[in-house]
Image (cartoon, rainbow, N blue to C red):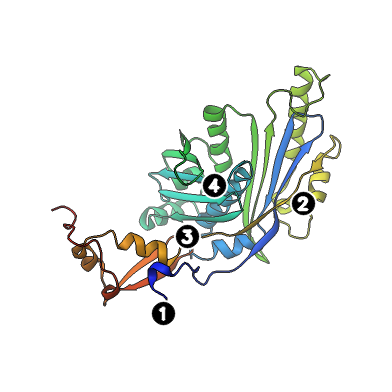
Amino acid sequence: MNQTPAFLDTGRPPVPDLVVPRGVLPFFLPNRPVRGRLVRLGPLADALLTRHRQHPAVTRLVGEAMALAAGLSAALKFRGSFSLQAKGDGPVPMLLADCTDAGELRGYAHPAPEKLEALLSADPAPSAEALLGSGYLAFTVDQGGQQNRHQGIVSIEGGSLAEMALHYFDTSEQLRCQVRLACAETPLGWRAGALILEKVAGAGGIDPAMSEDAQAESWHTATVLAGTLTDQELLDDELPGETLLYRLFHTEGVAADRARALSFGCRCSRARLASILEGFPPDDLDHMTVDADIVMTCEFCNYDFRFPRADVRGQAGAPPEGR
């Protein structure tokens, strides 16, 4: 039994202390209007995805979302986090993944069991569009503290999560991108990865003698080369990232930047949850109590935190909700 008071217990639950040192590998094509990020979660994908027992189609969607969030978070120039959230009316009405500037990664999906069973009976390998249904996709940059959050929201459009992300960039950010996502269960466990290309705006890093037509052609060439990437290559732990980038882009010249680490990044703690419970009126806390305990489950790491009701005072004198 942990004797530390809940409001002081900031320790993590028993989850893997796992770091992938080269999880995100930024790169660029010198003197070309192209930069990108190669994301490979390696064993971190299996550690995160197997926290929940879900159908492989749902697990695959979460893995792709985490790879995408990890790649996009690498563009952060400040301390904070990047999150991807999809809400729809389909069998998976909620999908969420986020990653901090330090590479702390997490994600989960919340399926609707009856809808999911009906879909899978008709299609055992449904698309992201079929799983999410109609709704919206939101990308959020959160600097924490008192800083304002930046959020972009678009309707869910596209058959795959990659296509949905491209729809966001086309309509919200007006940024030329190409996104390739993959997630699959391999002999070594679940693996997930992403290849994200961006067309550099303006003249930064581009050969000043390159015309706009030449820039457009260079971007087209890079996207064609990126299109030759296979899921097997993207998810292969034995294939170094630099080797893969050279295999794809050596005819254009490719340079890797400093790699960034990714880690098991659920940020839950007893202290944080205890502070939430202390904001509830006593009557509400009584309704939450089962067998003398209040149980709060972290959706990301799927861990149950138990708080003895006798140890939680609640908001003294506050009326129960609805009164």
**Dots 3 and 4: beta carbons under 8 Å?**
no
Which residue lies under the disc numbered 1? 3
Quarter-of-image position of residue 228: top right
Q: Earlier in the sequence, mark 4 or mark 1?
A: 1
Q: Nearer the viewer, mark 4 or mark 2?
A: 4
Q: Residue at x 35, y 61 (%)?
A: 275
- The kind of residue on which mark 2 rests is Gly
Task: Give the label on residue 241, or none.
Answer: 2
Which residue lies under the disc numbered 4? 80
Q: Nearer the viewer, mark 2 or mark 1?
A: 1
Q: Earlier in the sequence, mark 3 or mark 1?
A: 1
Q: x and y percent of residue 13 in the render? A: 49, 70
Q: x and y percent of residue 247 in the render? A: 83, 45
Tell me the CA gap for discs 2 and 1. Answer: 46 Å
Task: Give the label on residue 62, or none.
Answer: none
On screen, residue 275 above or below 39: below
Q: Earlier in the sequence, mark 2 or mark 1?
A: 1
- The kind of residue on which mark 3 rests is Phe
On screen, residue 153 above or below 42: above
Which residue lies under the disc numbered 3? 300
Left or right, 228 with reference to 287 = right
**Dots 2 and 1: beta carbons under 8 Å?**
no
Q: Earlier in the sequence, mark 3 or mark 4?
A: 4
Q: x and y percent of residue 42 in the render? A: 67, 59
Could you say which is closer to the camera, residue 124 or residue 223? 223
